[in-house]
Amino acid sequence: MLPEINYLAIIVAGLIPSIIGAVYYGTIFEKQWLSSLGKTKEEMVPDNMAVAYGLALLAAMVLSFSFKMIIEMMHKTVENGELVFGSHHTFGHGAMHGAFFCLVVICPVILSKGLFQKTSGKNILINSLFWIICAALMGGVLDSWN
């Protein structure tokens, strides 16, 4: 038995990294992020914007669907010998799941990648914070919008 899936919630949650990323990397931390990479704004423009943004959006949709499945698996309970999905659906609870998953899965990947690519600690921190924010918001949307 699989949980019911609200595909509109998955799409909305999947859009979060693009929306937050535009503000986070484009306004709030633009100077710090570019400085941490030793790059200019012009150097960071993708060679093929449609492919870069399209694949990033696809990856975010896969992540969103995966978050939903993981959150539901964490919520499974057994009642009368039957597996039941769907307990504890609140924004805060989902945000906690998203942030926790990010801290134990995504951030270690960012750290490991950054260490071997000799990325600055500042860049690792900026990217990790971005994904913690996105994962918390995605988890909140996915858990509360059942």
Image (tube, rainbow, N blue to C red):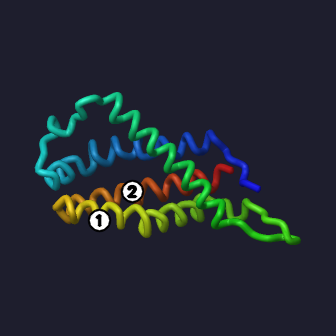
Q: Secondary structure at mark 2?
A: helix
Q: Residue at x 58, y 61 (%)?
A: 94
Distance between the Cα atoms at labels 2 and 1? 12 Å
> Can you give x and y, in whole percent of width and height, for residue 7 in the image?
63, 41
Label 2, on which residue? 131
> Can you give x and y, in whole percent of width and height, for residue 140 in the image?
56, 56
The amino acid marked with disc number 2 is Trp
The amino acid marked with disc number 1 is Leu
Q: Residue at x 54, y 56 (%)?
A: 139
Question: 83 left or right of 40?
Answer: right
User: Quarter of the image holding residue 81?
Assistant: bottom right
Label 1, on which residue? 111
Q: Residues within 10 Å of mark 1 (few under 14, many from 20)?
A: some
> Can you give x and y, in whole percent of width and height, for residue 26 in the image?
27, 42
> Can you give x and y, in whole percent of width and height, for residue 68 in the image?
60, 54
Question: 40 left or right of 24?
Answer: left
Q: Residue at x 72, y 49 (%)?
A: 4
